[in-house]
Image (cartoon, helix red, strand yellow):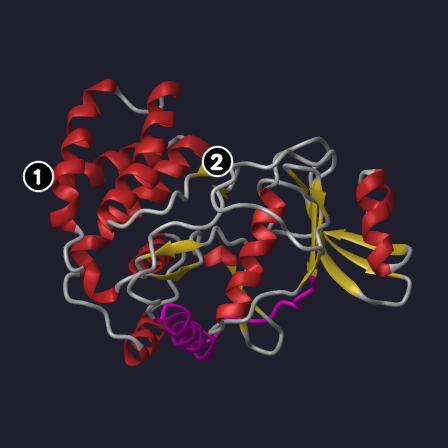
Amino acid sequence: MRPSVIPAPVRSAVEARLGPLTRLHRVGGGCIDPAAMVEGADGRRAFLKWSSGPGPDRYGVEARGLRALGARGGLAVPQVLGFSAEYRGGVHGGDGALERARGAGRSQGPSSPWLLLEWIEPGQRTEATDRALGTGLAELHRPLPPETLAGWEEEGWIATLPQSNHPTTHWPTFWFQSRLAPQWERARRSGALPASADRDFQALEGVLPEVLAGWEADGMCLLHGDLWGGNVLVSAHGIPHLVDPAVYHGHREVDLAMLDLFGSPGAAFMDAYQERLPLTPGFHERRSAYQLYPLLVHVNLFGGGYTDQALGRIRELVR
């Protein structure tokens, strides 16, 4: 693929970092936006994804999430080489200081959004990489101070859907009001979910504190937030890397439940995780409440059989 297929503003920004591009090869990881491996004249490679038209600051949120994961430690993440962003108040600069207040809201979208990351040469998943993922994720999930609130310092995204991160003291309230309810309401407005299911969903709000009981023992941790198998990249050196995060502070079982729903790495992973950070009894009962969120997201993004799965989880939880 010729480098000229990249929108001109994106190409100029990337070439400012890598020099003239000599190669562009489309790669996976761009199910929402196009993605490619790009190579500069000096042989340096990077991962690039972009959008051809104006859009909200999803890439800025993602880049800051990657940096937060990297700072917390536990698992590797690709280095952020640059990103487009336009912030409220005229604050610019994918690589500069971000001046924003907590919860300042969505930033205005750049004319040609893009994100440039360190290129991770892919390798093969093995039992050793599964164990490394389990150990590293447990380290990432180590508890934060007791006063840490559920949520995050800015609003976020799950794929292309808004994700509310308003800080909240009570975890089950956050899970219902900031995760489940917005996706349910979106799906109902679109007709993807039947009105007949509203009663069960409303009942879920009342039972959720009991379903998620015991969360206080773990407290809050830093979550990847969109941890399915496709967002774990194993390098040629056998090192698992986290990509495409939707970070916030929450209960660690959110990441575990989603990973189990879409692309579970298996017993070696869970054994290694539990050796480092044992699960509180009752995880398998709570798992459905946490898997309901990505299922509702998939109802809104893709429809299809995800509707029946989501409704089944709700019936399981309220009956």
What's the magenta region? 118-142
Amino acid carrying label 2: it is: Leu
Q: CA distance from mark 2 to mark 1?
A: 29 Å
Amino acid at pointer 1: Arg
Residue 163 falls in image quadrant: top left
| Image vertical order of residue 199 relative to residue 140, above or below | above
Residue 251 in the image: state x and y as whole percent.
30, 58
Secondary structure beneath disc 2? strand
Q: Residues within 10 Å of mark 2 (few under 14, many from 20)?
A: some
SS at mark 1? loop
Residue 75 in view, yes or no: yes
Q: Which quarter of the figure has residue 195?
A: top left
Q: Look at 32% across and 79% down and name the residue there.
A: 276
The residue that disc 1 covers is 319
Direction from residue 109 to residue 270 in the image, left or right: left
Which residue carries the number 2 mark? 161
